[in-house]
Structure formats: structure tokens, C-alpha cells
Amino acid sequence: MLILVSNDDGFFTEGIRSLAKALKKIGDVWVVAPDREQSASGHSLTLHRPLRVKKVSRDHHEYAVDGTPTDCVNLAINRLLPRKPDIVVSGINRGANLGDDVTYSGTVAAALEAALLGVPAIAVSAIPKNGEDEYSYDGAADFAAYLAQKTVEHSLEPYMILNVNVPSETEVGERRCVICKMGKRVYDDVLEERIDPRGRPYYWLGGASVKSRIDADTDCEAAEKNRISLTPIQLDMTKYSFLPKLQSWGLEQYGD
Amino acid sequence: MLILVSNDDGFFTEGIRSLAKALKKIGDVWVVAPDREQSASGHSLTLHRPLRVKKVSRDHHEYAVDGTPTDCVNLAINRLLPRKPDIVVSGINRGANLGDDVTYSGTVAAALEAALLGVPAIAVSAIPKNGEDEYSYDGAADFAAYLAQKTVEHSLEPYMILNVNVPSETEVGERRCVICKMGKRVYDDVLEERIDPRGRPYYWLGGASVKSRIDADTDCEAAEKNRISLTPIQLDMTKYSFLPKLQSWGLEQYGD
């Protein structure tokens, strides 16, 4: 089994190291990841400048690219790998990708790029220990390897991925997986205004009180209950149920 | 009618100027936009540093924020505006947001943030003139104002937006709108390898041949036919039809 690993936190992070190590037990692992953190600009393809690829290790298939996660997956599949991989696993992200934040995630974007190129993919993120900025990746990495194998066995449909969030408390082999839908992000008490020493205002968004609305059967609920969430995500964001309504607005009369 | 305008190309661009001007004919317009281009990092909220807001004009409601489009919309709705706006219009983006690229777009992200905060929203992008990097915004701006009014009259459902792409050739009042679904991005002949003067390889992605698969009834097809595309987009990316299949994989046996 040929496996491509990428992420958006960058090549030299604990999350991607743990993931690659766990996946080596089930297949031939190639790591192609950004040479620095790309959490903010992790989405688009780099079209306006060329990309450089650095082979990180002589003995292993490890490459650092000066681009986004999407660039890495594209370059790996279209050029670096000897053939189309059987699966792409993106992560392990330092921080959850739950609810609406999925649409903004570089970790998820790398997996979506694989789906666009016809390769099944999984995005894996670690949820910090309760209220702290502390992470552990062993449980997540082991579960990711298990899920990668299952995914290749059962196969996904085109233009979809699996999005997985694993609490840092999870031990290797521990059963706490829930299949669920995307939840809703809700920011409570979201904005704090302060005054600087020169008397001018500045604003903090989010602060400590970023919250999710805990709807039943969502990834947000799973995280709240300290479970591993597993959500099938599709590229197509069209709201089909609204198409007939929009047709009834009479927009063809524009210009009258 | 209270209207918030934002974008991801930045405050000082022709696209947002045209849009604000057209919308002033139908309501009270507030412009809150990034102080520089944010096309690459247009998605997430800025949580790790405070934001500064600069009032750009004394007579008009115009603010430049040193953050992302999402920051701008959040700050505007939660703090700057006198009340919740009736609608948010994001754009006009310099460049199309068609097919799968919708998931990566800062222009769309600004509209999605509005939807998350309970405000109806439209994302508007201009498609360059055939094969050139030349843009015209008047037709797009006029259509956006027409659509904004219609949207407030008919109202959207929660957690959705409208994504609009307008060919630069479009004249004010010209009827060429199509209601359609999201298409698929396809990159043909996607990667070019070159050798630098020191003999080392570098890679260009995409090049000149970025193409869309032209499926029927998609935004990509509309663009190909030089029509205005109008697509209802939802935040929820869950692939519901796959949930039962995933349940049948026996993942609860993990650890055996």
C-alpha cells in the first residue's frame, strides 16, 4: 500500500512524525509537507511563483515544499510519487477541525485536494487536553492507521474525504469512535475592546470563550464527550434544496 | 436597508468601490474591509493578536481592518455597525470563484461568516475578459445590488449564502443570469518542471492551462458560456448519504 502523508503545520512537527511512524506499519509511506507552518494560508494552489522541493532524508521518502498543503499534495501525486497513492492522510493537526471550521482548515484542504485528484483521503486533527494547549498524538496516529486501512478496503466515493478529530487523551487501541455530521461553530461573548497606552482602541476576537453549539450527532458533540469524531465531508457545497426557490424569485426580469 | 460590504482583495480596490457605489442606491452602506490583500489568508479568524480598525473617511462609514475578511465581517457585525445589517455583500473579487475553488475563497469566506452570524449574504466575483487579466465591475456591481434587494425581499435559509460570478463583459441591465450548482475544478497538464541556472529543478503549478470540467448546469458551464452564475452554497459539507455506509465498516471493532 502506497501512502502519502501531508499536513499544514509543516514538515518538522510532532503530529506528522507520529502519523508517518504509525502508517509505516501498514504501507510504504511518503511524506511531502510544507517546509513551514501554513495554518493561515493553507488552502489555495501557488500559481504565481515556482515551487522548490527539498529531499529531507536520503534514506526515506521525505520532501519539504515551500508551498501550501494543497501544493504539496498536488506536486506529490502529479510528480514525486512513483504512482498514484492508495490513500492520502493529512495531519495530525495541532488543534481541532470541528464544525464550520472545517471549511477553513488547511489540514482538510490537503485531503480535499487528494479527492480532487481521484485519491481517497483522510484529515486527522488532535483536540488539546481539556482547556490546555497540550497535545498527545499516539492514540490519534494509531487510529489513523487503522482507519486508512479500512478506507482502502471499503473505498470512498468520488469527491469526498473523511474528517477525523481525536482527543489527546485517547490511548492506543481505545474504542471511542463516533460517526457523526458537521456541527456549528458558535462564538460566545466574542469581542473584547481594550484601550492602548495612547488611548486608542483595539479588539480581541474570540478570546477564551470559543464555543460550539452542541447539537446531537455532531463532531462538536463528540469532542465535548471526549470521543473520536469521524465525519464524511464532500466537496460539493451546493444547497440543492434551495435551487427551486431561487428559480421562483423571478431574477430573469433583471433590467426591467 | 443596512448593508455591510467587505472583500478579500483589500479596502483600496476597484471591485469593492464599484460594489459600494451601486449598493448606495438601495441602502445605507458600511464598508469594513481588510487594509491589504488577503486572498491567500482570507479564511480564519485572527485569534492570536489584537485587531486595529482605521476609519478611512470622516463622512462615510468606511473602515479598514488589519485582519482577514472573516475578521472584518465579525468585527463589523459584533461591534462597528449600529445594528445587525440586513445583508452582507462580499466582493467584487478580482477573479472567478467557480467550482471547487469556492471552498478556498476568501470572498466566499466573508459571506459564510455573515451566515454564521445570522445575516444573509452574497459573494460576488468578476471573471476576467476572455484569456486576459482585464476586469470590468460595473455590470457585476449593478447585478449585485439587484440581487441584494431580491435576497432581502425573499430571504435565504440559515447557514447558506449565494455565490455569484459575473463575466467582465456584462453590461449594466443585461440579462444573462443562470441558477446552477457548483462545478468541478480540473487542472489539465498541471505541472511544469524547469531547471534553474544552477542545475536544480523547480516546478510551476497550473501554468496557463487551468481548466474546469464543463458539466451541465454548473457555475463552470455558465462561465464558459459567458453567463452570470448564481449558486446557493451551504456551510454544511457533511456527505449524509455516506453515513450509513461508514456505519457498516465495523469501526467499533478497533483495538481487537
Image: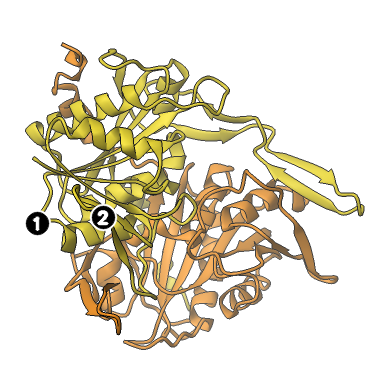
Chain colours: A yellow, B orange
Asked whether, in this view, residue B139 is left or right of residue B79, the answer is left
Asked whether, in this view, residue A233 is left or right of residue A187, the answer is left
Q: Name the residue under label 2.
A: A73
The correct choice, above or below, for A144 with respect to A178 in the image is below
Helix, strand or loop at disc 2? helix
Asked whether, in this view, residue A100 is left or right of residue B74, the answer is left
Q: What residue type is labelled 2?
A: Val
Nearest the viewer among A8 and A206 is A8
Toward which corner of the image does residue B64 lie, by quadrant? bottom right
* Chain name for mark 1: A
Give the percent coordinates (x, y) of residue A52: 32, 67
Residue drawn at x 50%, y 62% is B107
Q: What residue type is labelled 1?
A: Pro
Helix, strand or loop at disc 1? loop
Give the percent coordinates (x, y) of residue B40: 48, 63
Q: How crowded is mark 1: few (under 14 residues within 10 Å), some or many (20 or more)?
A: few
Asked whether, in this view, residue B201 is left or right of residue B157, the answer is left
The correct choice, above or below, for A175 with respect to B63 in the image is above
* Chain name for mark 2: A
Q: Name the residue under label 1.
A: A82
Give the percent coordinates (x, y) of residue A131: 57, 22
